[in-house]
Amino acid sequence: MIIGVLKEIKAEENRVSMTPSGVEVLVHSGHRVLVEQGAGVGSDFDDAQYAHAGAELVSIPAAIYAQAEMVMHVKEPLPPEYELIREGQVLFTYFHFAASEELTRAMLARRAVCIAYETITDQQGALPLLTPMSEIAGRMAAQEAAKYLERGQGGRGILMGGVPGVTPATVLVLGGGTVGAEAARVACGLGAMVFLLDTSLPRLRHLAEIMPKNCIPLMSSPATIRELAPKADAIIGAVLVPGAKAPRLISRDLLASMKKGAVLVDVAIDQGGCFETSRPTTHDQPVFEIDGILHYCVANMPGAVPLTSTLALTNATLPYALTLAKKGWQRAALDDAGIGRGINMAAGRITCQGVAEAFGLPHCPLETVLGRERTV
Ligand SMILES: NC(=O)C1=CN([C@@H]2O[C@H](COP(=O)(O)OP(=O)(O)OC[C@H]3O[C@@H](n4cnc5c(N)ncnc54)[C@H](O)[C@@H]3O)[C@@H](O)[C@H]2O)C=CC1
Ligand SMILES: CC(=O)C(=O)O
Ligand SMILES: [Mg+2]
């Protein structure tokens, strides 16, 4: 298969979808890998390393879109790329379609095969291509909350851990999955008092066993959120219903009950955000203020730590890229239902229910598309 690795064009996105060592494995498995010149620079990989790994360096992204059967990215395609995408071309990247009707309609119109890292599942039902970036974003979320709580950054001016004799910050984490647990762990490590909310009782039981004593796992409910939000110095949004728009857990009205200079970090912004007042921001201007509350809503947080993120991402994506390249997407999806769950769109149809529901568009089961594909 011909595989394309593009340079990311989203603001301050320094990751690349494949390391030189990943390219080497793909090439040794018999595939051609076209890498855009300079694609790895932000992650400290130069063109010579990719050439040494067997990649063909290409200067124009359009030439990669024209030749590659599978294009790998980190973030979703942006408007300048839309018209380069060919019918039936496999795009393998984070899409987060439920957050963008424009992207959804554009990919449908291109009739691309969109395989979303974030909805592929493994045999335990976990999200193996989302998890490493969630680990990073979760840890970062606590760091960013600590930073923006500083007075000079616009925050309340409270130190996460306090000091002996002085109360630490109170942190409310909504969602106790990968992001939430990592955020809570780092906030606890800094010494904060942490409330970690989830709707899954088995998950709360597990969290109660593994988290430190200054973390209190609690059942999430509107009443509990209403009770804790006014006490919080920082709230971290970390909920997920895979493929679907994030549930809205903090309304604008609730902001009025919160402390001025408190910080909201909406990690779930890539699925539309779990605070009513959230809108996506970028690393060059990560925060904005509404009703005296600071909002941090960067949709590609791991892009800020590319030396960690690119390695972690390739560790997770490479086995899937190898399978897709070897078998083709149809066979791969038939053999592994978890890969099938990654296919959000194919043949001009939406095959992920959450995405279809987000915009009231028709859903077509993947089996139907595969049946059609098999007969053409
Ligand atoms: N902004 C960024 O740069 C990044 C964002 N993310 C996003 O962070 C979000 C969380 O990801 P993960 O932790 O990996 O997901 P996860 O699936 O591991 O955890 C989500 C948790 O939310 C819980 N949940 C669902 N509805 C809830 C509700 N109403 N109240 C409380 N808890 C609820 C679930 O039970 C689950 O435990 C996703 O939207 C993901 O895409 C992940 C990485 C980077
Ligand atoms: C998960 C995701 O969207 C990111 O790492 O940017
Ligand atoms: Mg997870």
Image: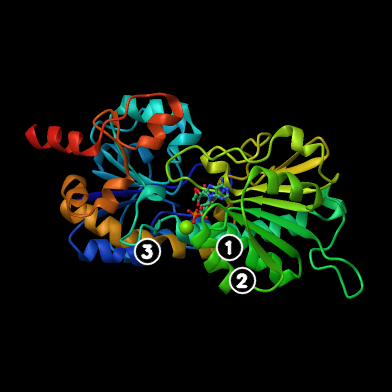
Q: Are marks 2 and 3 in contact (CB under 8 Å)?
A: no
Give the quadrant of residue 193.
bottom right
Coordinates of residue 222 in the picture (x, y in percent): 65, 43
Mark 1 vs ligand 1: CB below 8 Å:
yes
Q: Amino acid at mark 1?
A: Ala
Residue at image mark 2: 211
Q: Quadrant of residue 29?
A: bottom left
Dot placed on the residue nearer the N-terminal end, 1 or 3 = 3
Residue at 41% x, 54% y: name it. 17
User: Mark 2–mark 1 contact, CB under 8 Å?
Assistant: yes
The residue under label 3 is 20
Relative horizontal placement of residue 220, taking residue 38 as reference (left or right): right
Report the number of numbered marks: 3
Q: Circle 2 sits in a helix, a strand or a loop, which is it?
A: loop
Q: Secondary structure at mark 1?
A: helix
Q: Amino acid at mark 2?
A: Met
Secondary structure found at label 3: helix
Q: Specify the farthest residue to the left.
A: 375
Q: Nearer the viewer, residue 347 or 85?
A: 347
Label located before the other in sequence (2 or 1)? 1
Q: Tell me if the residue at label 2 has its CB under 8 Å from ligand 1.
A: no
Give x and y (percent) for residue 42: 52, 56
The part of the image, by quadrant, that contains residue 356 is: top left
- Badge 1 is on which residue? 181
